[in-house]
Every structure is written in structure tokens, then in C-alpha cells.
Image (cartoon, rainbow, N blue to C red):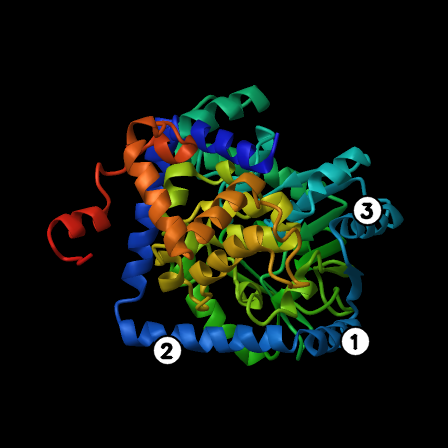
């Protein structure tokens, strides 16, 4: 089945799920209101967005140099740096580090990059027991499910579904539908896992080149536990997460939680600069960082598309997207849903694999208005729509022209020929008005939700001539 048909199938499934739409509408409205309350001063917000855009744009423009500096300073700090060009290479590197340390059990903090490379599946297939410790990700893992949002992965589940899942997976625990009690039950399960894990894996929100520091933003403390309790810590991140200086962090940290969840700031902000030193009482004795490319360096070279690498994964564009609210994250069939996912997945996977996503946009512009780093998402989506059909000569876009349909292309070429030749046009119009009753009412998907127009009995030229506006 083609990617377009698969996407259509997922869309129809989502649109028929009233519970899903009710849940997402409620959740997104809550997040939108929270963000609005955090930015009462419009001018101050625009200054913050401009500052954040400048920081991220500088990172992408100088990506190569900053990554070299980051590696050098991390190495000085005692962190072992690994480079992965593909998802497969990243998984192999992580597995080799775990294997060398004889690590069999892993606790993992929230990481979208690990979802991108399908790390859990890879490690499980290779005999490693890996447990998600972010509450939302933990709930997803219990049901062998996938995240539906980059910040709130289990937002598509209600408390009744979660209660049933706990009862199925932990029959010894008391059945409850109370959210606070469910959270406490999860805490008990996870605390035990933290204390016995051989290794911890985490993502990275920002990597500071100047100091060789990995920054991790979180609310639950699971990130801090995953990176400090086990003796081995492996961080994995996309190469675009690097920033030049430590002073770049406060502006980004200020705008990230406000844009993401409407919080003034997150509960925890972790800064990791190396393994445990001799005079320190806790922390891992070994720290590794895996820097993932997976198409990012290719995208970075195209100055008309590399704005997407400025993304700080706040999810605000998703929260404000009218299409996402109706469909939810799973309908996209990708790790990153919503406006950011349309662009990022199309560029990294290729239009031949994810180009159908470009149709999931109304061009309302809400995503661009709320993006904290001013990514022009509608412009990028429109460019990719064009690339998927026209296939402009660009090395940065894979699968260009893959959605072009020969029949549709022929129709448009015929249309252009008719309208560029006056005599042919007149003959065409006269024929259509005379054969108007033969025009089909079903012309594919376009007519599914619209009435198919029929040609008028008389053309504009004939009407104008009969009214005396055209002289013989």
C-alpha cells in the first residue's frame, strides 16, 4: 500500500474516534491557555523569540565547528564521544558500550531521538532489558504503544485505560482509577528498577560546546535518576542540539517550558559535564555521548530548509495545530507528528517515505506564530509540497518528485496548452458548454466533500457577445 493510502487509512481511523478527538481538544486547549498566560507582554515575547532564533541559527550555521569544539571539551571532561551517521550505527554503538560493560538492565529517561532510532526494539532484540522511566513513556511501554506527542507521549490515554493497563501488568497492586494513586504505584515500580539498573540512557536538550556540558530538562526526576544512579550513563542526541556558549542556555530554558506546557520553568534542570570524580560521592563512573546525524548534516547545508534544525522540541506548534487536534499523533505514522514532524520527517526520511504528510496542513500559520525560535513552518511545508511533485534540483531533499502522478501531470499540461492557445481555448469552451450534461459527478477525492461543478449553458464570451459587449 502506498504511503498516501496508508496515511489516508490512519486519518479515517482517527476521525472516527470521538473519544480521541475529545481528549486531544481538551488537552490542547489547556496547553494553549497555559502558554498564553506565560506571555502576557507581546513585545517581550517577540524579543525572546528573536533572541532564541539567533542562538539556534548560529548553532546551525556553525554546526561543524561547534561539534568539534563540543567533542574536544567533552573529551577533556572525561566523556567518551561517539559519532553515528545512521540510526543503525547509533544502535550498534550503544549496544557495544552496554555489552562491554556487561550491562543487562537499562533505565531510560525521555528521549525522542531514541524513539527516532527505535533503540528500545533494537536492545530488546539483543537481550537487553530496557525500561522507560518517564511516566508517560512508561505507560506507553506497558501497552507496547507509541508516543502521540513529543512532550506528553501518553496524552491520548485516559485514566480508565491507564488503570486497566496497570491491572494487567501489575496484578499484585490495588486496582485504582485515581490519578495520584496510579502515579504513586508507578513510582514504587520505577524506584526499584533505578536501584538495580546496570546502565542509564538519556536524551539531551542542549549540548554546550564551550564547556562540554549536556543539559537535560525534565519534571519528574527520572532523568536525574537515570543519569546518576547507574554506574554507566549513555546520552544520545541529534547533532543539531549543540549551542555555542553557556550563556545561550538561559534564554532557551526560559522560553522552552513556557511554550511547551505553560510552566514558568521545569522542576529539574540537569547539567552533566563528566563522570563522577574521585572526590564525589555519586554519579556514573562512565559517561558516553552518541551524536546522531541521520540526515541532519544534509539538511543543514540547505539554507532555505535548515531552519527546521532550530527546533527545541517544545511541541507548541503541535499544540496549536488544528489538524493535529483532530487526528492525534498516531495518524501521522511517524515519531515526530504535527507541523514540525511534517517537515523534519519529510527531510530526514525522504519525500518518497513521508511526503504524504505535507498534505496534513491547512496553511493557517498558527505554528509559525507560536514557535519560540521562529521556524517558518508553513513556508517549509509549502516548499516540500512543491518538491514532492515538481522535484526541484536540490541535493538536500530526498525523494523529490516521488508523489507526482502521470495522469494528473498530463491533465495540467493539457490545461496549460488549452489556456495558452486562444483558438484551442474557444473550441474547448464551446465543446464543454454543449456537452455539459456529460460531465461526471464523481471526479475522485475532490468530489467526496464537494459538489462537482458543471459548465454553464453559455460561455462568458457568448454572453458578452449577446449583450453587445463584443462587436463582430
Q: Position of residue 1 (x, y in %)?
A: 61, 29
Identify the residue at the far left of this view.
Answer: 467
User: Which residue carries the number 2 mark?
Assistant: 47
Mark 3 or mark 1, earlier in chain: 1
User: Which residue carries the number 3 mark?
Assistant: 95
Most foreground residue, 169 or 421: 421
Q: Of helix, strand and loop, which one carries label 2?
A: helix
| Label 3 crowd bin: few (<14), some (14–19), many (20+), radius 10 Å | some
Most foreground residue, 60 or 28: 60
Answer whether residue 319 is visible to the viewer in this image.
Answer: no
Q: Of helix, strand and loop, which one carries label 3?
A: helix
Give how far apart the Cα atoms at labels 2 and 1 are. 36 Å
Marks 2 and 1 in Cβ contact (< 8 Å):
no
Q: Of helix, strand and loop, which one carries label 1?
A: helix
Q: Position of residue 36 (x, y in %)?
A: 29, 60
User: Which residue carries the number 1 mark?
Assistant: 76
Amino acid at each position: 500500500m502506498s504511503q498516501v493510502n496508508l496515511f489516508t487509512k490512519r486519518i479515517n481511523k482517527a476521525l472516527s474516534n470521538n473519544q480521541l478527538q475529545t481528549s486531544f481538544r481538551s488537552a490542547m486547549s489547556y496547553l494553549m491557555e497555559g502558554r498564553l498566560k506565560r506571555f502576557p507582554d507581546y513585545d517581550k515575547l517577540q524579543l525572546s523569540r528573536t533572541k532564541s532564533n539567533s542562538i539556534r541559527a548560529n548553532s546551525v550555521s556553525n554546526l561543524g565547528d561547534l561539534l568539534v569544539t563540543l567533542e574536544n571539551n567533552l573529551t577533556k571532561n572525561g566523556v567518551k564521544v561517539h559519532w553515528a551517521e545512521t540510526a543503525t550505527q547509533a544502535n550498534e554503538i550503544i549496544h557495544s558500550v552496554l555489552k562491554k560493560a556487561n550491562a543487562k538492565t537499562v533505565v531510560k529517561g525521555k528521549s525522542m531521538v531514541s524513539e527516532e532510532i527505535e533503540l528500545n526494539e533494537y536492545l530488546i532484540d539483543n537481550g537487553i532489558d530496557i525500561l522507560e522511566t518517564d511516566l508517560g513513556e512508561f505507560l506507553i511501554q506497558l501497552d507496547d504503544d507509541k508516543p502521540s506527542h513529543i512532550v506528553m507521549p501518553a496524552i491520548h490515554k485516559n485514566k480508565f485505560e491507564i488503570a486497566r493497563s496497570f491491572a494487567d501488568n501489575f496484578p499484585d497492586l490495588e486496582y485504582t482509577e485515581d490519578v495520584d494513586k496510579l502515579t504513586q504505584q508507578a513510582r514504587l515500580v520505577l524506584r526499584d528498577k533505578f536501584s538495580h539498573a546496570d546502565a542509564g540512557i538519556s536524551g539531551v536538550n542542549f549540548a554546550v560546546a564551550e564547556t562540554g556540558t549536556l543539559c537535560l530538562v525534565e519534571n519528574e526526576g527520572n532523568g536525574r535518576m537515570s543519569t546518576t544512579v547507574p554506574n554507566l550513563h549513555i546520552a544520545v542526541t541529534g547533532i543539531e542540539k549543540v549551542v555555542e556558549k553557556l550563556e545561550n542556555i538561559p534564554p532557551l530554558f526560559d522560553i522552552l517550558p513556557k511554550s511547551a506546557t505553560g510552566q514558568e520553568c521545569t522542576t529539574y534542570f540537569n547539567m552533566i559535564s563528566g563522570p563522577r570524580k574521585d572526590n564525589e560521592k555519586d554519579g556514573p563512573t562512565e559517561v558516553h555521548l552518541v551524536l546522531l546525524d541521520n540526515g541532519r548534516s544534509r539538511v543543514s547545508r540547505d539554507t532555505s530548509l535548515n531552519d527546521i534544525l532550530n527546533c527545541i522540541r517544545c511541541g507548541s506548534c503541535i499544540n496549536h495545530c488544528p489538524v493535529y487536534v483532530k487526528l492525534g499523533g498516531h495518524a501521522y505514522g511517524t515519531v515526530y507528528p504535527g507541523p514540525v514532524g511534517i517537515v523534519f520527517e519529510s527531510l530526514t526520511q525522504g519525500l518518497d517515505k513521508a511526503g504524504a504528510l505535507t498534505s496534513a496542513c491547512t496553511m493557517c500559520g498558527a505554528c509559525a506564530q507560536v514557535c519560540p525560535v521562529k521556524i517558518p513552518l508553513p513556508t517549509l511545508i509549502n516548499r516540500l509540497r512543491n518538491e514532492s511533485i515538481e522535484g526541484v534540483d536540490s541535493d538536500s531533499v530526498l525523494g523529490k518528485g516521488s508523489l507526482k502522478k502521470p495522469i494528473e501531470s498530463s491533465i495540467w499540461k493539457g490545461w496549460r496548452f488549452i489556456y495558452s492557445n486562444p483558438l484551442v481555448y474557444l473550441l474547448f469552451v464551446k465543446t464543454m458548454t454543449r456537452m455539459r450534461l456529460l460531465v461526471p459527478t464523481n471526479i475522485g477525492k475532490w468530489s467526496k466533500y464537494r459538489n462537482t461543478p458543471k459548465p454553464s449553458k453559455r460561455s462568458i464570451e457568448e454572453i458578452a457577445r449577446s449583450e453587445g459587449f463584443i462587436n463582430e
